[in-house]
Image (tube, rainbow, N blue to C red):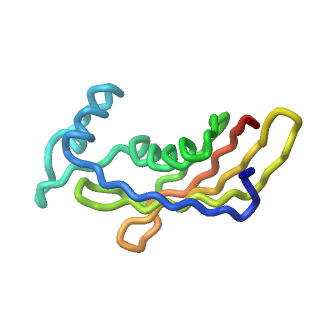
């Protein structure tokens, strides 16, 4: 079924301390807030790691992202669940593909933690 404007996809993910430490190793961003627990035993989750949550929707759609912009509004910590709603805002159909623009809103505990936009393509079968 082709993507349509208004289609909404929701995914959720929680990050573990092991996830954060692995991302710190992979990215080279191993600042103490990502590797040493706070007074509640939590690690701060990298903003770029949080921005990977909507990639699950991209996978569901078979989308190859071309551009993406994210704005972090609040910190995310391990043990919190990130709920990400992705809404297809624009669909441009060509002979070979669909060009999509998707608006992203990520929340934790009902508060917005990240917003953004992703543009990419979905190849026609």
Above-or-below relation of 105 to 95? below
- Outermost residue, right side: 95
Relative placement, left or right, of 25 versus 11 is: left
Relative placement, left or right, of 54 versus 88 is: left
Residue 7: horizontal and vertical position, in percent? 67, 62
Q: Quadrant of the C terminus?
A: top right
Residue 14: horizontal and vertical position, in percent? 31, 54
Q: Nearer the viewer, residue 67 or 63?
A: 63
Q: Nearer the viewer, residue 92 or 26?
A: 92
Name the residue: 18% across, 54% down: 42
Residue 53: horizontal and vertical position, in percent? 45, 49
Residue 54: horizontal and vertical position, in percent? 51, 49
The answer to which quarter of the image holds residue 83 is bottom left
Above-or-below relation of 88 to 96? below
Name the residue: 19% across, 45% down: 17
Relative placement, left or right, of 89 versus 53 is: right
Name the residue: 40% across, 58% down: 12
Relative placement, left or right, of 46 versus 79 is: right
Name the residue: 77% across, 42% down: 99
Q: How many marks?
A: 0
The answer to which quarter of the image holds residue 34 is top left
Q: Nearer the viewer, residue 61 or 35?
A: 61
């Amino acid at each position: 079924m082709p993507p349509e404007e208004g289609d909404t996809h929701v995914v959720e993910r929680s990050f573990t301390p092991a996830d954060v430490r692995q991302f710190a190793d992979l990215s080279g961003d191993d600042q103490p807030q990502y590797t040493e627990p706070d007074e509640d035993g939590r690690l701060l989750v990298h903003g770029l790691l949080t921005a990977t949550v909507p990639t699950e929707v991209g996978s569901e759609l078979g989308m190859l992202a071309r551009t993406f912009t994210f704005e972090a509004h609040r910190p995310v910590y391990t043990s919190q669940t990130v709920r990400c709603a992705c809404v297809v805002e624009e669909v441009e159909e060509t002979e070979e593909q669909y060009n999509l623009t998707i608006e992203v809103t990520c929340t934790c505990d009902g508060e917005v933690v990240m917003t953004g936009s992703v543009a990419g393509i979905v190849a026609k079968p």
